[in-house]
Image (cartoon, rainbow, N blue to C red):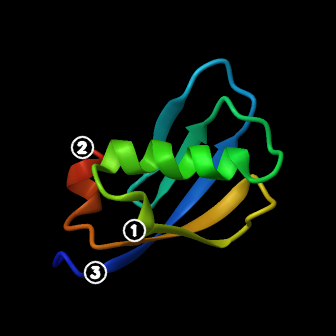
């Protein structure tokens, strides 16, 4: 993939966890455990931040395109060179 590519990532967000965690389910699916409660978008913001830090890309490159008020979300990630490499797959 080139640096300008866009990918869609299926994300299951588990709010209210005791600690943050990322579980890679497949090359295009992850589970994120976040500490924040699902109020006022705080869990979504934390999920974006956690994913941003893990993938080493800016938060502005990650957008929720489906499921903003659901635990099951679709994120659009822009400008990532190879997500499989980032996930260690």
How far across and down, in percent of the image, does residue 10 sit? 56, 62
Task: Point out the image quarter for the N terminus.
Answer: bottom left
Give whichever of discs 1 and 3 has the lower sequence position: 3
Looking at the picture, does residue 72 appear above or below residue 14?
A: below
Q: Where is residue 70 in the image (x, y as percent from the top left)?
A: 79, 58
Q: Nearer the viewer, residue 42 or 17?
A: 42
Up/down of 39 relative to 82, above or below: above
Q: How far apart are marks 1 and 2 (CA)?
A: 20 Å
In the rendering, at what x and y percent does residue 31 appear?
57, 43
Q: Residue at x 30, y 57 (%)?
A: 57
Tag of residue 88? 2
Q: Which residue corresponds to mark 1? A: 61
Which of pointers 2 and 3 lies earlier in the amino acid sequence? 3
In the rendering, which numbered label is found on residue 5? 3
Residue 10 versus residue 86 in the image, above or below: below
Mark toward the start of the polypeptide (1 vs 2): 1
**Compared with residue 75, is residue 41 higher up or lower down, i.e. above or below?**
above
Q: Nearer the viewer, residue 13 or 84?
A: 13
Neighbour tally class for label 1: few under 14, some 14-19, many 20 plus, Cα within 10 Å: some
- Give the CA separation, mark 1 to mark 3: 11 Å
Q: Please name the residue shown 80% across and 44% down the image.
A: 38
């Amino acid at each position: 993939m080139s640096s300008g590519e866009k990918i869609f990532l299926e994300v299951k967000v588990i709010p209210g966890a005791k600690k943050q965690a990322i579980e890679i389910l497949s090359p295009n699916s992850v589970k994120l455990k976040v500490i924040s409660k699902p109020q006022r978008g705080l869990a979504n913001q934390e999920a974006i931040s956690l994913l941003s830090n893990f993938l080493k890309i800016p938060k502005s490159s990650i957008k929720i395109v489906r499921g903003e008020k659901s635990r099951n979300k679709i994120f659009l990630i822009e400008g990532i060179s190879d997500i499989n490499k980032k996930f260690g797959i």
